[in-house]
Image: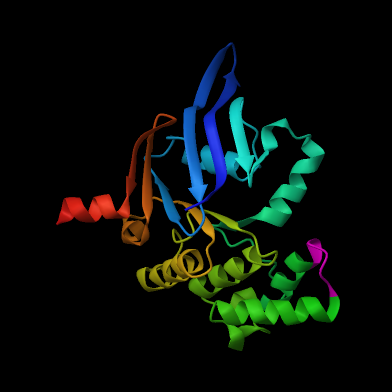
Amino acid sequence: MNAIIEGHGLTKTYAQGEAAMRALDEVTLDVRRGELMLLVGPSGSGKTTLLSILGCILRPTSGTLRVMGEDVTRMKERDLPAIRRERIGFIFQAFNLFPMLTAAQNVALALDLKGISGRLARTRAASLLEQVGLGAKLDAYPADLSGGQKQRVAIARALAGDPPVILADEPTAALDSHSGRAVMDLLKTLARERGRAIAIVTHDNRMLGYADRTVHMEDGRIVADERAEVLEGAVA
């Protein structure tokens, strides 16, 4: 599988008075096309910090990060929004939908931010919602949707720019088991059949069976990086 994101020696340090707290400590990791990867570990282990760096939201204190071959750590701050907009889709635990907009309008707004508007945006929004199983909910408002349906709208929105990478922070945390499995089935399909690279931060042990790869973190470091075939062999 081809690596779309490559991080080498990523470190993130925060000042705490006269001391310094190292949230990420010399992490080397890639995110590969067609692979669903889970980032797991206790709270404070550096998972979300790592995801934010991979998504070009945070800059590392040191180390290098390449997105589709480009060294984004050398880019100016003004150039990073285009990387996020064109190459990375984000999914969050809280959905972050606009309550006054319908499902289709929420997705169309994301398309508008990517330069697609008007009738084409409405058509594309309908197509994306159809892909995530919400073709009958185009005109529904978030208040009228279940948690699982809201997360599917959020996934459709993340797909708006057809990004090769999807990064998700606790996408099933607010969902019941049935809705959580439906969301993970969808994300797994996006990786396996659409070739997208997907990295997910999760505390939800129910999701481990969906992973092609599980990266365990503690104290800002990767302590294990396991692939599904290895895990299956250990169980057998």
* Residue positioned most to the bottom: 136
- Total marks in image: 0
Residue 36 in view of the camera: yes
Q: Residue at x 79, y 42 (%)?
A: 79
183 over 41 or under it: above or below: below
Q: Which residue occupies the foreground of this view, 215 or 232?
A: 232
* Residue positioned most to the top: 18
Residue 25 percent location from the top left of the image: 48, 26
* Residue positioned most to the front: 1
186 relative position to 225: left or right: right
* Residue positioned most to the left: 236
Q: Quadrant of the C terminus?
A: bottom left
Is residue 8 within the magenta segment? no
Q: Which residue occupies the foreground of this view, 84 or 153?
A: 84
Q: Residue at x 60, y 88 (%)?
A: 136
Q: Residue at x 77, y 50 (%)?
A: 82
Residue 100 in view of the camera: no
Residue 164 percent location from the top left of the image: 61, 58
Residue 54 percent location from the top left of the image: 58, 42
70 relative position to 51: left or right: right
| Predominant SS along the magenta part | loop
3 over 106 or under it: above or below: above
102 relative position to 228: left or right: right
Quadrant assignment, res 13: top right
Q: Provide the residue span drawn in magenta.
A: 112-117
Is residue 113 within the magenta segment? yes
Residue 99 percent location from the top left of the image: 68, 70
Quadrant assignment, res 232: bottom left
Q: Residue at x 76, y 67 (%)?
A: 111
147 over 17 or under it: above or below: below
Specify the color scheme.
rainbow
